[in-house]
Image (cartoon, helix red, strand yellow):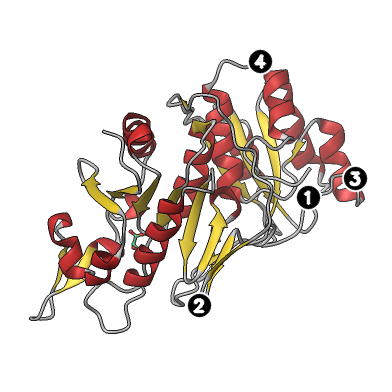
């Protein structure tokens, strides 16, 4: 059934899925009573349908199985809606948004993840505004991307990160402009999106042989050397500043043997904003020489899920190395 102005809400769990009852307890909200919880939805000229994943979860329990469920729901319902809104816990929202951005190739409609710091029914809840504006943007259907909407800002999903555990403004997009900001009106950034007429292609093969290693001063050789040479396929190495790491012999030797064993090492900065620039300092030139790949200005969430996506695909090692360094879904600045 083709609807004119329609949005599918997909509920996965988290604070946004809770409401505070008159007696003060928190309960998961019933999707059938959504418009009772948020009466403002009745003023919309939009058909809103809501479904839930099989087993709603706190997003700290997020897994690739749920990402696949979400991608498959969107694939099945793609032609029936103008856009999709995913209600998700904020803790791992940036991972889900990044993963979906890679899994949904040729996406030509908005997929907006949103959440809340306070449940519906709590006096100062942010849930209502986040849901209402996400639906409004999704219904318009003009942004062909996986996005995150939180506290008046629409962000590219694979560019944002959770930066605050308490404030309503929980997410930042440190290396990319906001796609829209909601004030009296919703102001869209003048970004040229690449709309496509190709069919949506959903990738569900994600490789889990990946990990993140954050460097720190005074790392112990036994631990780090064994992690670097453990049986994974790709590692996101979170380095200092513009992509710098210790030049201690044992560390560089461990990196060298990992690369020789065909492991992918992707260099991401621990800094919240800015980019890796291998070769700027001697402490990153060595990594470049050894074959470590620059992740440029990607977030850790985007870097990890991009590796999962590429390693799960049918690419040669050379192709994966190349694709890691170019923008596939707007996740890095070239
Ligand atoms: N722990 C919750 C979750 O991520 C927090 C939230 O909903 O924002 O599911």
Which quarter of the picture shows residue 204? top left
Q: Is residue 141 left or right of residue 219?
A: left
- Indicate the position of residue 231 as horizontal and vertical percent values: 54, 26
Which quarter of the picture shows residue 307? top right
Rounded to the nearest angstrom, the CA distance separating label 2 from label 4 is 50 Å
- Indicate the position of residue 145 as horizontal and vertical percent values: 53, 44
For disc 1, the marked residue is 276
Rounded to the nearest angstrom, the CA distance separating label 1 from label 4 is 24 Å
Rounded to the nearest angstrom, the CA distance separating label 1 from label 2 is 38 Å
Q: Is mark 2 within 8 Å of ligand 1?
A: no
Q: Which mark is residue 184?
A: 2
Look at 20% across and 40% down and name the residue there: 54
* Residue in front for this viewpoint, 203 or 322: 203
- Dot 1 and dot 4 residues touching (CB under 8 Å): no
Q: What element carries label 3?
A: loop
Task: Looking at the image, tell me whether mark 1 or mark 2 is earlier in sequence order.
Answer: 2
Please identify, in this view, whether the residue under mark 3 or under mark 4 is nearer the observer. Answer: 4
How packed is label 3: few (under 14 Cα within 10 Å), some, or many (20 or more)? Answer: some
Q: Is mark 4 within 8 Å of ligand 1?
A: no
Quadrant placement of the N terminus: top left
Q: Which mark is residue 279?
A: 3
For disc 4, the marked residue is 316
- Indicate the position of residue 177 as horizontal and vertical percent values: 67, 60
Q: In this view, does 150 lie to the left or right of 175?
A: left
Q: Which mark is residue 313?
A: none
Please identify, in this view, whether the residue under mark 2 or under mark 4 is nearer the observer. Answer: 2
């Amino acid at each position: 059934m083709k609807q004119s102005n329609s949005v599918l809400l997909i509920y996965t769990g988290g604070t946004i899925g809770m409401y505070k009852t008159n007696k003060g307890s928190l309960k998961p909200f019933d999707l059938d009573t959504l418009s009772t919880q948020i009466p403002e939805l009745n003023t919309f000229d939009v058909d809103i349908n809501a479904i839930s994943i099989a087993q709603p979860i706190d997003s700290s329990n997020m897994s690739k199985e749920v990402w696949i469920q979400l991608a498959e729901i969107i694939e099945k319902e793609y032609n029936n809606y103008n856009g999709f809104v995913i209600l998700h816990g904020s803790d791992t929202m940036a991972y889900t948004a990044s993963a979906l951005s890679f899994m949904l190739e040729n996406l030509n409609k908005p997929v907006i993840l949103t959440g809340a710091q306070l449940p519906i029914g709590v006096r100062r809840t942010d849930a209502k505004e986040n849901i209402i504006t996400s639906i409004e943007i999704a219904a318009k259907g003009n942004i062909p991307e996986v996005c995150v909407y939180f506290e008046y800002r629409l962000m590219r999903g694979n560019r944002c990160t959770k930066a605050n555990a308490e404030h309503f403004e929980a997410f930042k997009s440190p290396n990319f402009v906001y796609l829209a900001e909601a004030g009296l009106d919703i102001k869209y950034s003048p970004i040229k999106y690449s709309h496509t007429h190709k069919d949506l292609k959903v990738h569900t093969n994600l490789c889990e042989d990946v990990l993140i290693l954050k460097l720190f001063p005074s790392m112990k050789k036994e631990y780090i050397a064994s992690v670097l040479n453990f049986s994974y396929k790709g590692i996101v190495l979170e380095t200092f500043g513009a992509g710098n790491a210790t030049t201690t012999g044992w560390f560089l030797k461990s990196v060298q043997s990992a690369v020789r064993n065909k492991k992918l090492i992707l260099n991401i900065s621990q800094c919240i904003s800015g980019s890796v620039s291998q070769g700027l300092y001697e402490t990153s030139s060595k990594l470049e020489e050894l074959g470590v790949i620059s992740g440029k200005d990607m977030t850790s969430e985007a870097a990890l899920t991009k590796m999962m996506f590429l390693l799960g695909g049918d690419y040669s090692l050379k192709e994966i190395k190349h694709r890691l360094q170019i923008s596939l879904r707007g996740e890095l600045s070239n």
